[in-house]
Amino acid sequence: MARILIIEDDFIIRQSVEYALRRAGYEVKSLDTGAGAPEIINEFSPDLIVLDLMLPGMSGFDIADAVRKKDSETAIIMVSALGEDSDKLAGFALGADDYVSKPFSMDELLARIQANLRRVDTKEMFKKDEILRPGDLVIDPKTFKVTVGGAPVTLRTKEFQLLYTLALNQETLSTREDLAKTVWGYEYLASSRTIDVHIRRLRAIIEELSDYRYIQTVYGRGYRFVPIRKEDEDP
């Protein structure tokens, strides 16, 4: 039975999510403040944390940062009324696996929880033998390591899986639906901005160091992985 920790100061949301998760068969613990959250997380050892951002005592951003400094495996779903891309980017940069904007449906939250709890199995699926070497990238699915021009870069699990999926299907259109199913394991994500925010972060991490542009946007459709030297780009 998976253990889930809810950290949410809104009583109605916290109680509703806790009730739905208990009915779904999860072991659940909840907090209404960020104060002392890292210690509770250490004691409870949750498999997944549903984490509000605007909390008394300690913000969700600070809690995520504290968790990721010690633990790379616990899934974190940030839940917030802050829906700007900058907020999502900040959350993903601190190690969030997913981001749900308020208001949300309970069915959607449950689907995202289930998908993120399957991420260990998904991670194993990507441990193949084929090392990809597009442009000046080396993407090793067995070790989950990426280098750009020989320099190692650090990617979160979902970022690596997204990059590997795109590179494995080089020059083929990958729709948001394709990426949502392959990387996250569910379709709700296809209509959200989460994929777009992950793409922006990938571009910032990889293309900043690379001599290539890799991820091309196909407007209204999705993305295509095509290595193009920056010096060969149209002026």
Image (cartoon, rainbow, N blue to C red):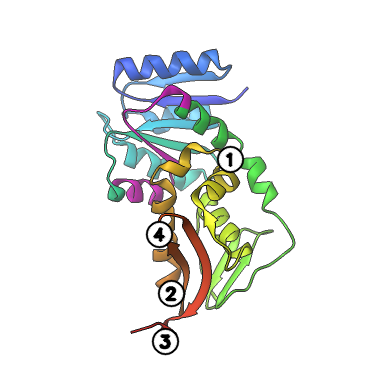
Circle number at residue 209: 2
Give, as a single range, the part of the protein colored magenta. 87-107
The residue that mark 3 highlights is: 231
92 w.r.t. 172: above or below: above
Residue visible at 42% across and 81% down in the picture: 230
Label 1 or label 4, whichever comes before in sequence order = 1
Residue visible at 56% across and 19% down in the picture: 26
The type of residue carrying mark 2 is Leu
Residue visible at 30% across and 16% down in the picture: 11
Q: Is residue 9 left or right of residue 202?
A: left
Label 3 or label 1, whichever comes before in sequence order = 1
* Distance CA(mark 2)–CA(mark 4): 25 Å
Residue most extreme to the front:
220
Q: Which dot, 1 or 4, sits closer to the camera? A: 4
Q: Secondary structure under badge 1?
A: loop
Judge whether residue 46 can be spotted in this image: no
Circle number at residue 219: 4
Q: Secondary structure under badge 2?
A: loop
The residue that mark 1 highlights is: 185
* Distance CA(mark 3)–CA(mark 1): 37 Å
- Nearer to the camera, 46 or 211: 211
Residue 221 position in % (x across, y down): 46, 55
The type of residue carrying mark 4 is Tyr
Q: Quadrant of the N terminus?
A: top right
Residue 140 position in % (x across, y down): 65, 64
